[in-house]
């Protein structure tokens, strides 16, 4: 009986702990993807990165010899295998501003795969590699 009680207490103790923060936390660099079934390679003249903290993201473009620019910011939340992103800033006119987009996400080692059907009907599949 005592062993059973100790096992239950130990199990509850372990369940009380969860990893700190989001599994997306860190810097990710775009490596290409698919748009409507067609290959979309990563740009060669610049790099696209996303930096996630526990609730927000910043998307930036990095070009050699130029100042890094934030081209998009937003909030996100995770629920199981789904990421809900809401764009709160975009440096260009955007039809996605303040709209929440649902992505299915898959994390495999250092690769993040984001899959969605955007409001305009485009089916996207983006691949990002974790830098730090």
Image (tube, rainbow, N blue to C red):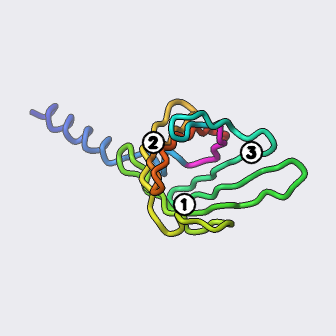
Q: Which secondary structure is most common in the magenta stretch?
A: strand
Name the residue located 54 percent from the left edge and 38 percent from the top edge: 112
Image coordinates of residue 15 in percent, x first then y, are 30, 43
- Distance (Cα) linking label 3 and label 1: 20 Å
Q: Residues within 10 Å of mark 3 (few under 14, many from 20)?
A: some
Q: Which residue is mark 2?
A: 105
Instruction: Pick the residue in front: 16 or 51.
Output: 51
Instruction: Pick the residue in front: 93 or 106.
Output: 93
Instruction: Pick the residue in front: 118 or 131.
Output: 118
- Distance (Cα) linking label 2 and label 3: 21 Å
Name the quadrant of the C terminus: top right
Query: In the structure shown, which secondary structural element does the residue marked by tag 2 occupy?
Result: strand
Name the residue located 44 percent from the left edge and 48 percent from the top edge: 117
Q: Is residue 105 above or below residue 69?
A: above
Q: Quadrant of residue 129?
A: top right
Q: Which residues are magenta?
A: 25-31
The earlier-in-sequence mark between 2 and 1 is 1
Q: Which residue is mark 1?
A: 56
Name the residue located 14 percent from the left edge and 33 percent from the top edge: 4
């Amino acid at each position: 009986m005592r062993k059973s009680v100790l096992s239950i207490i130990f199990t509850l103790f372990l369940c009380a702990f969860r990893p700190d923060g989001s599994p997306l936390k860190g810097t990710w660099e775009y490596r290409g993807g698919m748009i409507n079934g067609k290959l979309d390679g990563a740009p060669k003249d610049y790099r696209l990165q996303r930096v996630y903290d526990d609730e927000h993201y910043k998307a930036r473009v990095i070009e050699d010899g130029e100042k890094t620019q934030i081209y998009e910011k937003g909030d996100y939340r995770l629920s199981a295998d789904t990421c809900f992103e809401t764009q709160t800033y975009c440096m260009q006119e955007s039809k996605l501003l303040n709209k929440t987009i649902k992505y299915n996400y898959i994390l495999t080692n250092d690769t993040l795969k984001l899959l969605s059907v955007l409001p305009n009907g485009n089916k996207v599949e983006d691949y990002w590699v974790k830098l730090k």
